[in-house]
Image (cartoon, rainbow, N blue to C red):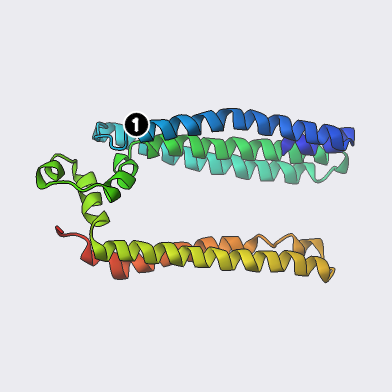
Amino acid sequence: MAAAIFTDEVMHSDGIVLLATFAFVAAGLAFTIPAGIDHASFAKAHPYVADFYTAEEKATARRCASIAIVAGIAVILLGVAVAGLFEVESNVQVYGDSLMMMLVAFGVGMIVHWGMLWGRTDLADYNKEWLETVELSDDELAQLDQRSREAYLRANNPRCRGAADRKGKACMVIMLVATMVALVWLFAASAMGASEGVSGLFWLPWVVGSLGSGIALIVIDDDDAEPHCEGKL
């Protein structure tokens, strides 16, 4: 996006804008597609991984992720502030917009990178899909670490499975409704000739939907799932 904004304002050529955009998209895909294929192959070959991380390693990963989240948000806000500073002079506004997108990309990259490094220490979550499909004997269950054992018991508890299904359906319905509202907002605002400020806010229903999904997860989890998912099957 930074390259597209810059080339659009400086060179005024749609062809160059598309070339710059697709070049960076291709570069991103060159990283993400092989990584995704490798991860899928690893997960297929190793559906279960014993928890080998120490408590200190997990604490370090969590601390680094917390710092990265705060720093990433600060970088994103810095990008917005920079764009506002460049807004004063219209002839250099393009540099502010491009720099803002670069800082946003950098901030998001920090959050995603360190968040993934923290997430890899949660092997119970990695093992969740396998634990939901496998049947273990008492001896095999005893060999699992505590979090994986609890995940297995929750996954095979009919009451908890029902709560998980309800949470998934609730979130899906909320986001589908948010999407419909956003699309109606976008096309209706254009058809009615609304101002750019009004039509440009069509993304708000998705934010509200995300918050609503979070509320639904908390409410369903607290009321239905937790009190019934602690014991053995």
Residue 97: x and y in percent read: 75, 41
In what element is the residue under mark 1? helix
Residue sitting nearer the eye, 81 or 222? 222
Residue sitting nearer the eye, 60 or 35? 35
* Residue at image coords 32%, 65%: 163
* Residue at image coords 73%, 43%: 83
Q: Quadrant of residue 11?
A: top right
Q: Quadrant of residue 193?
A: bottom right
In the picture provided, is 6 more to the left or to the right than 57?
right
User: Which quadrant of the rendered structure holds the C terminus?
Assistant: bottom left
In the picture provided, is 165 more to the left or to the right than 98?
left
- Check disc 1 and report the residue beneath it: 45
Tag 1: amino acid: Ala
Q: Is residue 194 visible?
A: no
In the rendered view, tell whether residue 87 sits above or below residue 120.
below
What is the total number of numbered labels drawn onto the structure image? Answer: 1
Residue sitting nearer the eye, 153 or 83? 153
* Residue at image coords 13%, 46%: 137
Q: Is residue 145 visible?
A: yes
* Residue at image coords 52%, 35%: 110
Residue 158: x and y in percent read: 25, 63
As drawn, which residue projects farthest toward the left?
139
Residue sitting nearer the eye, 163 or 102? 163
Q: Residues within 10 Å of mark 1 (few under 14, many from 20)?
A: few
Residue 181: x and y in percent read: 64, 68
User: Which quadrant of the rendered structure holds the N terminus?
Assistant: top right
Q: Quadrant of residue 26?
A: top right
Residue 30: x and y in percent read: 60, 28
